[in-house]
């Protein structure tokens, strides 16, 4: 009897639960979870937009034996064996990767290994393959470079062969793409080098191979003018319905051409400005070949401007002093405001990203794990690692020494993107809207929102991200629609150290504007500093953070600096009649540079004048105000 009563109670309760469940399931209501339809970019993804494999002719002729599959595998955190036979892996995997092999003679090494008939039908190809097969790579590289320098394709291969090589690249990207986990963005490098000056661009597709395979990549044999690359990009989109963008390399090897006063194919007018801003929304501000944010000659009051500076020449000749102002990002951003004032359009309205430009197939940007520019520079006690020149192989017409040895190469950099998910489309869209930032290899987290409606207490909001998008703009945005009459731009800023890295020294706002005379100006504000240091009335903290680096052991401690820094900052000098931009530079405390790790591990002698200690940093994309 007791059991029957208990059973009756159970049945009654179960019936009520079922009825309630059915009622809840059929009732008209919104989803309980507030995040089902969320579109806020709240995922921070890390990647490299500029990596070369053995499908790049120069990488292969320098000894790179690793192809795209190995590059993707390494980027995903798996251990690999380098071309020089060393085992390595990343401390933490990347979230996305663009393999940007040179489009010029793409896949030359696989063709030589396979004795491709098209290649062997050409006298140049037969001799090059003979040198390659004999292991005489230096001779092969010299022979190849000599012909390429003539500006004509030394290997006029059939469309079928070129398509086969390109499709091997895109197929590898497809096979390694894991939406939500790891994104492989299809890309290539167009290597325009007029007169030996580097104007290279990486072309990045939003699309998969179905669209990317329809048109072969553009090459510098077709034209060395960026404007003609934009023509190709426009034709690609019109033909396929796909989407592409281009990323210029940092301009310190361009000998003044990257941000020149005149374009190669015509004047810098409004039409040129609009085209450049459309096709090149971001700029590679830091990479292995030095840092391109600013220069001490351009920013004499900036004590952090002389960082990983490469300012001696291009690939083939020395630099003249007046070229410097047309090579660095901050100066270009300022001059973009001047062009906007005179032409009505800004050609240099770009976001900032970092990449490696490694030719080893290995995206390594941590100082203690740096595998160098190319296989000859991989970790070794040999001469090349520190002392072989990266540029300066060709004699300057005036006999000037402009060489830079590999010891001055940077273990840099990385691209950080704020995205909704880890897919090709989401990463590409973040690049396109410039919601991205560059680091010199560290993985510090940086976020900013700017607008006229922010207040100091907003810095502590629990819903800052969603509120920030509703009230202001993130990095890469334009302020105008978020400023009411009488408002000055206000910023809420957060930075968090790399969990496997160094504490933070300070957060700086870099402001550029155009004055009443039409001349661009700049000013630096220290908006957050670690420790008990003070910011002066002029907005600067002149007290260094200190230095814990033990040079004898290549170690440092996080006894100084801060794990997190935050700031609310409002422009004290805002003039609504003056166009302006603002970006953040976030600095870590001093840490050992890769040459110090090498010196202690391998016993190699560091060349004179090469830095052993550095301050890693991040540069966010700017936000702009236009009257």
Image (spheres, rainbow, N blue to C red):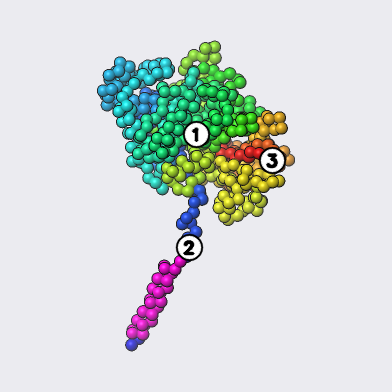
Q: How many marks?
A: 3
> Measured from the top left, where is residue 44 in percent x and y?
49, 46
Q: Where does the N terminus fall, quadrant-wise? A: bottom left
The mark nearer the N terminus, 3 or 2, is: 2
Residue drawn at (42%, 45%), measured in percent from left and top? 423
Instruction: Tell me the element at label 1.
Output: helix
In the displayed structure, 174 sits above or below 410; it is below
Q: Secondary structure at mark 3?
A: loop
Secondary structure under badge 2? loop
**Main SS of the magenta segment?**
helix
> Is 341 left, or right, of 101 in this rendering?
right
Q: Residue at x 42, y 18 (%)?
A: 151
Q: Quadrant of residue 237?
A: top left
Position in image of residue 104 (x %, y %)? 39, 25
Outermost residue toward the top?
398
Indicate the position of residue 211 as horizontal and vertical percent values: 37, 38
Q: Please give the residue where the numbered disc 3 appears in the rendered image.
A: 576
- Tell me if mark 3 has few (under 14), some (14-19) or many (20+) residues whose alpha carbon lies within 10 angstroms of its own: some
Residue 279's disc is: 1
Bounds of the magenta span?
A: 3-28
Q: Earlier in the sequence, mark 1 or mark 2?
A: 2
The answer to which of 269 and 97 lies nearer the viewer is 269
Specify the label residue 444 is tagged with: none
Magenta residue check for 392 = no
* Residue contact at pointers 3 and 2, CB within 8 angstroms: no
List the residue tagged with mark 2.
30
Q: Is residue 10 magenta?
A: yes
């Amino acid at each position: 009897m007791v059991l029957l009563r208990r059973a009756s109670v159970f049945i009654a309760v179960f019936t009520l639960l079922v009825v309630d469940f059915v009622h809840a399931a059929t009732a008209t209501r919104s989803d309980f979870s507030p995040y089902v339809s969320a579109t806020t970019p709240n995922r921070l993804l890390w990647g490299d937009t500029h990596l070369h494999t053995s499908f790049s002719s120069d990488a292969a002729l320098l000894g790179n034996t690793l192809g795209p599959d190995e590059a993707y595998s390494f980027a995903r955190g798996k251990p690999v064996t380098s071309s020089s036979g060393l085992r390595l892996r990343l401390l933490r995997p990347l979230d996305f990767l663009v393999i940007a092999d040179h489009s010029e003679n793409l896949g030359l090494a696989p063709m030589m290994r396979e004795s491709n008939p098209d290649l062997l039908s050409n006298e140049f190809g037969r001799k090059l393959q003979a040198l390659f097969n004999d292991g005489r790579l230096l001779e092969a590289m010299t022979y190849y470079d000599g012909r390429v320098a003539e500006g004509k394709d030394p290997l006029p291969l059939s469309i079928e062969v070129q398509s086969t090589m390109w499709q091997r690249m895109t197929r590898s990207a497809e096979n390694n793409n894991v939406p939500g986990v790891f994104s492989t963005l299809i890309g290539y490098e167009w290597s325009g080098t007029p007169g030996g000056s580097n104007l290279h661009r990486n072309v990045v597709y939003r699309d998969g191979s179905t669209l990317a395979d329809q048109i072969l990549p553009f090459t510098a044999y077709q034209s060395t003018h960026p404007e003609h690359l934009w023509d190709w990009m426009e034709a690609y989109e019109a033909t396929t319905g796909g989407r592409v963008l281009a990323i210029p390399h940092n301009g310190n090897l361009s000998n003044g051409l990257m941000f020149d006063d005149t374009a190669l194919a015509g004047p810098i007018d409004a039409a040129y400005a609009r085209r450049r801003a459309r096709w090149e929304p971001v700029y590679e501000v830091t990479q292995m070949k030095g840092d391109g944010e600013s220069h001490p000659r351009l920013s004499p009051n900036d004590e952090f401007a002389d960082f990983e500076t490469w300012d001696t020449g291009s690939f083939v000749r020395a630099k003249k002093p007046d070229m410097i102002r047309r090579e660095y990002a901050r100066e270009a951003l300022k001059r973009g405001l001047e062009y906007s004032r005179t032409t009505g359009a800004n050609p240099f309205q770009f976001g900032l990203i970092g990449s490696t430009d490694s030719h080893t197939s290995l995206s390594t940007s941590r100082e203690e794990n740096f595998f160098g520019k190319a296989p000859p520079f991989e970790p070794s006690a040999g001469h090349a690692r520190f002392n072989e020149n990266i540029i300066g192989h060709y004699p300057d017409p005036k006999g000037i020494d402009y060489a830079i040895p590999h010891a001055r190469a940077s273990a840099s950099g990385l691209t950080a993107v704020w995205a909704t998910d880890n897919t090709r489309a989401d990463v590409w869209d973040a690049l396109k809207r410039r919601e991205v930032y560059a680091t010199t290899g560290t993985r510090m987290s940086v976020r900013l929102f700017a607008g006229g409606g922010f207040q100091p207490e907003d810095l502590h909001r629990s819903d800052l991200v969603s509120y920030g998008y509703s009230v202001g703009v993130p990095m890469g945005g334009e302020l105008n629609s978020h400023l009411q009459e009488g408002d000055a731009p206000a910023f809420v800023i957060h930075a968090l150290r790399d969990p496997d890295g160094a504490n933070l020294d300070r957060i700086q706002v870099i402001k550029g504007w155009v004055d009443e005379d039409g001349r661009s100006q700049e000013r630096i504000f220290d908006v957050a500093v670690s420790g008990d240091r003070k910011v002066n009335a002029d907005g600067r903290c002149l007290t260094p953070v200190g230095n814990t680096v033990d040079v004898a052991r290549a170690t440092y401690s996080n006894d100084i600096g801060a794990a997190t820094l935050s700031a609310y900052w409002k422009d004290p000098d805002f003039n609504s009649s003056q166009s302006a931009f603002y970006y953040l530079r976030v600095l870590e405390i001093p840490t050992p540079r890769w040459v110090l790790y090498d010196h202690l591990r391998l016993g190699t002698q560091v060349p004179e004048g090469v830095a052993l200690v550095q301050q890693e940093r991040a540069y966010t994309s700017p936000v702009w105000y236009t009257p």
